[in-house]
Amino acid sequence: MQGLFKMKYLAAYLLLQIGGNASPSAADISALLETVGAEVDSAQVDKLVAELEGKDVNELIAEGSSKLASVPSGGAAPASGAGASAGAAAGGAEAAPAEEKKEEAKEESDDDMGFGLFD
């Protein structure tokens, strides 16, 4: 995992910033992690602080979010589903009540089995 930061160091850095420490030091991060009994690799902490020094974390998060927005995540399915539901709303308005009647009939058939959940 060389070259990558462990999330606990980054999380500690962000928690310290939220708590009012505008630029947490390696000692601050280590102290926070030690209060919860976490093992601290000082080399990793030093590397994180060096990488974030002089940078605005909010800008880094925004930049990362924009990069993630370009990653395909299966978002096309709702678009086709929306088109199908729009078509049903335009021409098949009667299809919805028919489906509801079928569901009610199925629920009633469960009651006819001769036993209940709390009997």
Image (cartoon, rainbow, N blue to C red):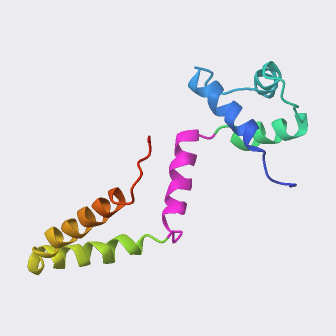
| Marker count (numbered) | 0
**Side (left or right) of 59 relative to 82:** right
Q: Is residue 20 above or below residue 53?
A: above
As drawn, 66 above or below 6:
below
Where does residue 106 sit, x and y in percent of width and height?
A: 30, 66
Q: Name the residue rendered at 27%, 72% in the picture.
A: 82
Q: Nearer the viewer, residue 118 or 2?
A: 118
The correct choice, above or below, for 50 with respect to 115 in the image is above
* Side of 102 relative to 31 (left or right): left
Quadrant of residue 28 within the rendered picture: top right
Where residue 39 sits in the image (x, y, percent)? 88, 31
Stretch in magenta: 55-73
* Residue 31 locus on image (x, y percent): 80, 20
User: Could you say which is closer to the camera, residue 109 or residue 46?
Assistant: 109
Looking at the picture, how far across and down is residue 70, in whole percent? 50, 68
Q: Nearer the viewer, residue 106 or 82?
A: 106
Q: Residue at x 89, y 34 (%)?
A: 42
What secondary structure is the stretch in magenta mostly built from? helix
Please say whether residue 110 is one of the residues in the magenta stretch. Answer: no
Q: Hey, which residue is sitting farthest front in the picture? A: 114
